[in-house]
């Protein structure tokens, strides 16, 4: 099955660009990134904090069935324009990855379709290469599939 979420990683660069077209209005797609209840559903994570405003913070975690935290990440929202963009940092706890800078752009294609473009900037080319060796692309595609499935029901 073809992955709908595309990752473009040029050689010798410390960034990558992720794109995905959704069968969702841009307003609904944007809502999936700023409303804690929706974020928790499609990410499969507990939303500890999500302040969807300029200089707001966010924090998510995932636990195993025994309640042990297996993933925790946080960051700061540097800029946010409804239905257009979010600029934020992303930092994972307890791993040897430097914080990354993410630019999310939301684009209306038609009244019922939209596109998400994410540019992620890493500290170095080596950090980006390490990220790409993980099942990052598969996990992101699965999360975006869940996002579209959940929001289609809300339409």
Image (cartoon, rainbow, N blue to C red):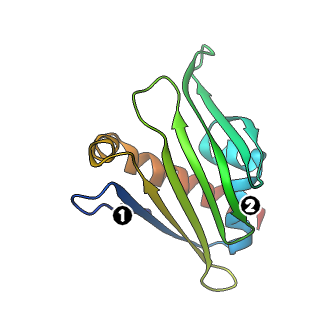
Separation of residues labelled 2 and 1 (CA atoms): 26 Å
Secondary-structure class at tag 1: loop
Q: Label 2 crowding class (10 Å Cα cut-off): few <14, some 14-19, many 20+?
A: some
Quadrant of the image containing the N terminus: bottom left
Residue 95 versus residue 27: which sits nearer the camera?
A: 95
Q: Position of residue 79 (x, y in %)?
A: 68, 59
Q: Is residue 63 above or below residue 48?
A: above
Q: Which is more foreground, mark 2 or mark 1?
A: 2
Q: Residue at x 28, y 49 (%)?
A: 125
Q: Residue at x 51, y 51 (%)?
A: 101
Instruction: Specify the farthest residue to the bottom.
Output: 110
Residue 143 tag number: none
Residue 145 versus residue 84: which sits nearer the camera?
A: 84
Q: Is residue 126 above or below residue 5?
A: above
In the drawing, does residue 39 fall left or right of residue 133?
Answer: right
Instruction: Report which residue position mark 2 lands on.
Output: 31
Q: Is residue 63 above or below residue 41?
A: above
Q: Position of residue 122 (x, y in %)?
A: 40, 48
Q: Residue at x 22, y 58 (%)?
A: 12
Residue 2 tag number: 1
Q: Is residue 37 above or below residue 34?
A: above
Secondary-structure class at tag 2: helix
Q: Name which of mark 2 and mark 1 comes first in the sequence.
A: 1
In the drawing, does residue 93 fall left or right of residue 50?
Answer: left
Quadrant of the image containing the C terminus: bottom right
């Amino acid at each position: 099955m073809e992955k709908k979420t595309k990752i473009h990683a040029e050689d010798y660069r410390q960034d990558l660009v992720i794109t995905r077209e959704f069968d969702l209005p841009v307003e609904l797609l944007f809502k999936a990134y700023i409303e804690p209840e929706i974020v928790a559903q499609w990410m499969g994570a507990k939303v500890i904090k999500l302040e969807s405003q300029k200089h707001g913070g966010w924090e998510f975690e995932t636990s195993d069935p025994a309640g042990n935290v297996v993933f925790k990440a946080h960051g700061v929202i540097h800029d946010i324009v409804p239905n257009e963009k979010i600029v934020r940092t992303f930092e994972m706890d307890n791993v040897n990855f430097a914080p990354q800078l993410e630019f999310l752009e939301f684009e209306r294609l038609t009244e019922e379709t939209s596109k998400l473009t994410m540019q992620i900037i890493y500290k170095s080319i080596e950090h980006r290469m390490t990220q790409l060796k993980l099942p990052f692309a598969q996990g992101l595609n699965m999360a975006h599939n869940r996002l579209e499935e959940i929001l289609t029901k809300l339409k």
